[in-house]
Image (spheres, rainbow, N blue to C red):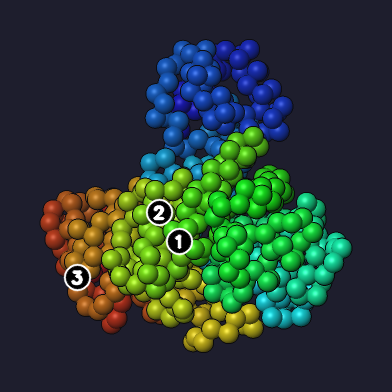
Amino acid sequence: MRYVREITARVRRVPLLQKELRSLATRLDQRFAFSYIITVMKATVASLLLAAVGLTADPTDFQNNVPGPGCSAGQAMNDAMAGPAVASSASSMGPLRVHPTNPRYFADACGKAVYLTGSHTHLSFKDGGGRAAGTSPLDYNAYLDLMVANRHNFMRLWSGWELTIYDPAPWRRTGPGVAADGAPRFDLTKLDEAYFDRLRQRVLAAQKKNIYVSVMLFEGWLLRFVPNSAAQHPLSSANNINGIDADTNQDGSVTEAHTSKNAAVTAIQEAYVRKVIDTLNDLDNVLYEIANESVFPASVEWQYHMINYIKKYEATKPLQHPVGMTSAGFSSSYDDLTNLLDSPADWISPGRPRSLTYDYLNNPPAADGLKVVISDSDHLARVMENPSWIWKSMTRGINPIFMDVYPPLDTLQSGDPSFIRKTMGYARAYADKIDLSSMTPRADLVSTGYALANPGSEYLIYQPGSGSFAVSLQNGRYDYEWFNPSKGLSAGTGSFTASSGNRTFTPPFAGSAVLLIRAAGASASPTAGAP
């Protein structure tokens, strides 16, 4: 970082200031020192600090490569004092924040753009769902190991199931009286620590595997489609001792729980959300999702309220985490994309409406950076069997995740999902190879229509079909690498010199192809040859 080098040189000539800065790094446990100056105290204090050593600040210089609260910040400052010879390579997962220069992605605590991808499964948190209460068919740690083996770094934690067929619930079942399922009625003023203990344990276990977790707060699909869902919901008057009834129109459906129609219901939900945040706020691998596939447009105002409520409450806490809003799902008669894009959410998961005015499955719209887009197969199709969706999404600036059919958790009929899992890992490996923060979707540069590019520096192209394709390049010397996505294998490297304009490339294998092109010298020297 330019300022670190300049501060290093000048601070060494100001021993008193050097001592004070090291002291600050130590007092803040070497975690918050640099970010405290840059992020918490913002530009004002940062400018004062720089002025103390004879520098002036340009605010844009603080946007990139600045350690965040979890990025060994005090160590970063001490590294600056010590000089490059002894600099630390410490880093941290987060909390994630929208990347300041490429908002299609999140940035980690060290400012690096993060490509999110991974799988999730319905019983990743709660037990039940038609199985005996208290029994879990999921070996959670084994599933995390499966994700790691496939290079996944993101999971959607299904902690939001609301109906009583799932347990644990966030409220204690104390009675008096019996709920519709034969168990004691809920006391909605008493939160059940067992739920929150499990929540923390599972997010921590994922953190140890370097996996980001989107914590689902509420779940709307069952409220919409299970007959008489009110009979199975804790916020139905028959099931709690508090006189709370979310079924405001008494039609047997409890979709009103995801609206702002009942202030008492919203207050109960807010108390639960506060407890979730209190439980997880210190963890750096957390994101929040308001609700899975809630009713649209009825839930929009409520979801916006919950997003803002989380942001306001977390503003009083040490860490702030991204908050997301997801679609009503595939084949919906209501097009909810505008609601998602207009929301205060940091990230969204679009659906695939019946109208197909856009199609995140077969021809994903290029991400424009208005929101981080996490495209979930759960909202696009009943089952996902075509791995090309992953490469198409990636090269359109989208972060794809997979609704897994991890047996025996689901009854969805599908083929072997193992290659889908592997493909997400292959794509992430290429995301790690490139300077993702500088790459944008550039369909205009390739005849295939699928590419991330920083023209003149790097190009990542996907050919969903077969055969030759054209790439518009700038003058220069380039290295290239072929990847066969059908086999998961590299398939040749080389170098070439290009003049400005289109150049034709022919994959050395049949079928779909991935091609990485880099300005010569930006990567390890490849073998001789030409594509």
* Label 1 to label 3: alpha-carbon separation: 42 Å
Kindly state the secondary structure of the residue where label 2 is placed.
helix
Residue 412 point in image, percent of width and height: 54, 83
Residue closest to the eye, 305 or 197: 305
Q: Which mark is residue 296?
A: 1
The 10 Å Cα crowd at callout 2, few under 14, some 14 to 19, many 20 or more, is some
* Label 2 to label 1: alpha-carbon separation: 9 Å
Kindly state the secondary structure of the residue where label 1 is placed.
loop
Q: At 19% from the left edge and 74% from the top edge, which residue is drawn? A: 468
Q: Which quarter of the rendered picture does the N terminus lie within? A: top left
Q: Amino acid at mark 3?
A: Phe
Residue placed furthest toward the front: 250
Instruction: Give the labeled residue for mark 3.
Output: 469
Whichever of labels 2 and 1 marks the residue nearer the N terminus, that label is 1
Whichever of labels 1 and 3 marks the residue nearer the N terminus, that label is 1
For residue 348, which quarter of the picture?
Answer: bottom left
Residue closest to the eye, 292 or 519: 292
Callout count? 3
Q: Which quarter of the rendered picture does the C terminus lie within? A: bottom left
Q: Which mark is residue 339?
A: 2
85 is higher (above) or lower (below) than 406: above
